[in-house]
């Protein structure tokens, strides 16, 4: 490992020892604060030791103070401001006929650099489809996929196979969510694009099927991106239909160039909101159990 502590500048405050989530820093036999060689392999690369160090004495492999660390900003968001921000966000499904500038999307995606992640390194990959025509090319195939959901759920043998192969969570999402919508022709293209809602761009979060924690990490990325959209005056909606279609329909996968060995987790349709909501919605749907 190329982790390193500069002993000339280290003040031995030991904050890095206290902060490290996996206890890979200690005091060595020379009374120096140092990485513990036999533990370094479990470094999470979280960078917290470098961030807490007053004298910039720590170097974690792959990180540099110049590239990865910023002057700590003042946090001006108190609880009330935070609630105002998140409660003024809506899933936006009506967009202005206006493309999203590449620079703006890049800025949105920059916010993901501050996201937490389970299991190092974060292996989520992101495909940005900033081309309405390409999104449209996929729609007839996605429509067909949604029609097929009806057949699959109605067929007890296919249902059993889906439950067995994809798990009960996926099956219940198909049966209790997509199936009734498909039955009512909710997504039929003859009514317009109710799948991606004429969004000018689509962001797909995917990862190698065997990558650790990729589902959780992708959802955290998507959540950050959605909040970043809101902060930048754009809007978006998480879309679970496109990933399901990508994972099932080879031609859809090809259109979006998602690698064969990857699984799509979640997607976001994005654009400039056409309408302004007049109210925030407070749902109170959570179940809480307190143990005190
Ligand atoms: C995992 C996930 C998947 C979703 N998939 C879709 C989708 O395919 N189509 C859609 O219109 N909305 C989708 N949504 C958006 C929800 O319907 C939306 O969050 C919900 O209606 C609440 O509205 P709000 O976000 O404005 O509070 C999804 C949300 C999540 C978290």
Image: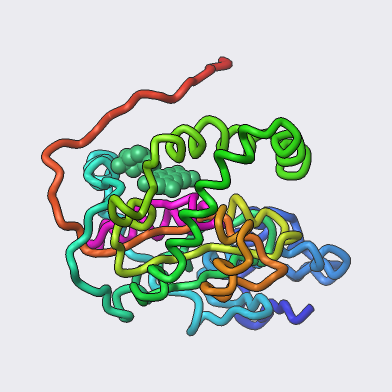
Q: Left or right: 272 with respect to 106?
A: left
233 in the magenta segment: yes
Q: Report x, y in % for residue 67.
A: 49, 83
- At horizontal 30% and vertical 63% (from top left) the residue drawn is 199
In the image, is residue 274 above or below residue 55? above
Q: Report x, y in % for residue 163.
A: 72, 36
Image quarter where ligand 1 lies: top left
* Quarter placement of the C terminus: top right
Q: Using the rendered image of the protein, determine whether residue 46 is visible from the camera's viewpoint.
A: no
For the residue pair 235 and 180, the one nearer the viewer reads as 180
Q: Report x, y in % for residue 180.
A: 46, 32
In the image, is residue 162 above or below residue 209? above
Q: Which residues are magenta?
A: 218-243
Q: Using the rendered image of the protein, determine whether residue 279 is visible from the camera's viewpoint.
A: yes
For the residue pair 70 and 274, the one nearer the viewer reads as 274
Q: Quadrant of residue 210?
A: bottom right
Q: Report x, y in % for residue 32.
A: 75, 70
289 in the magenta segment: no
* Quarter placement of the N terminus: bottom right
- At horizontal 32% and vertical 27% (from top left) the residue drawn is 283
- At horizontal 59% and vertical 50% (from top left) the residue drawn is 216
For the residue pair 207 and 187, the one nearer the viewer reads as 187
- At horizontal 37% and vertical 60% (from top left) the residue drawn is 269
Q: Magenta stretch: dominant SS?
A: helix
For the residue pair 192 and 17, the one nearer the viewer reads as 192
């Amino acid at each position: 490992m190329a982790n390193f502590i500069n002993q000339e500048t280290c003040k031995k405050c030991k904050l890095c020892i206290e902060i490290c989530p996996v206890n890979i820093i200690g005091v060595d036999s020379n009374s120096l604060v140092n990485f513990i060689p036999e533990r370094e392999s479990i470094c999470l690369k979280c960078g917290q030791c470098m961030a807490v160090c007053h004298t910039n004495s720590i170097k974690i492999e792959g990180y540099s103070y110049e590239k990865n660390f910023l002057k700590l900003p003042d946090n001006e968001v108190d609880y009330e401001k935070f609630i105002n921000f998140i409660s003024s966000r809506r899933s936006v499904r009506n967009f202005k006929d206006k493309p999203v500038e590449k620079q703006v999307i890049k800025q949105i995606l920059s916010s993901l650099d501050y996201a937490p992640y389970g299991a190092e390194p974060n292996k989520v990959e992101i495909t940005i489809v900033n081309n309405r025509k390409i999104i449209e090319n996929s729609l007839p195939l996605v429509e067909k996929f949604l029609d097929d959901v009806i057949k699959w759920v109605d067929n007890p043998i296919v249902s059993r196979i889906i439950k067995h192969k994809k798990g009960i969570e996926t099956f219940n999402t198909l049966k209790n969510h997509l199936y009734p919508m498909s039955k009512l022709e909710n997504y039929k293209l003859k009514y317009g694009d109710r799948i991606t809602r004429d969004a000018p761009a689509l962001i797909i979060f995917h990862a190698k099927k065997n990558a650790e924690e990729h589902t959780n990490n992708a959802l955290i990325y998507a959540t950050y991106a959605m909040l970043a959209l809101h902060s930048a005056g754009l809007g978006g909606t998480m879309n679970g239909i496109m990933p399901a279609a990508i994972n099932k329909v080879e031609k859809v996968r090809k259109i979006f160039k998602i690698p064969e060995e990857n699984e799509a987790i979640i997607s976001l349709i994005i654009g400039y909101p056409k309408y302004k909501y007049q109210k925030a919605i407070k749902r109170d749907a959570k179940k809480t159990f307190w143990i005190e």
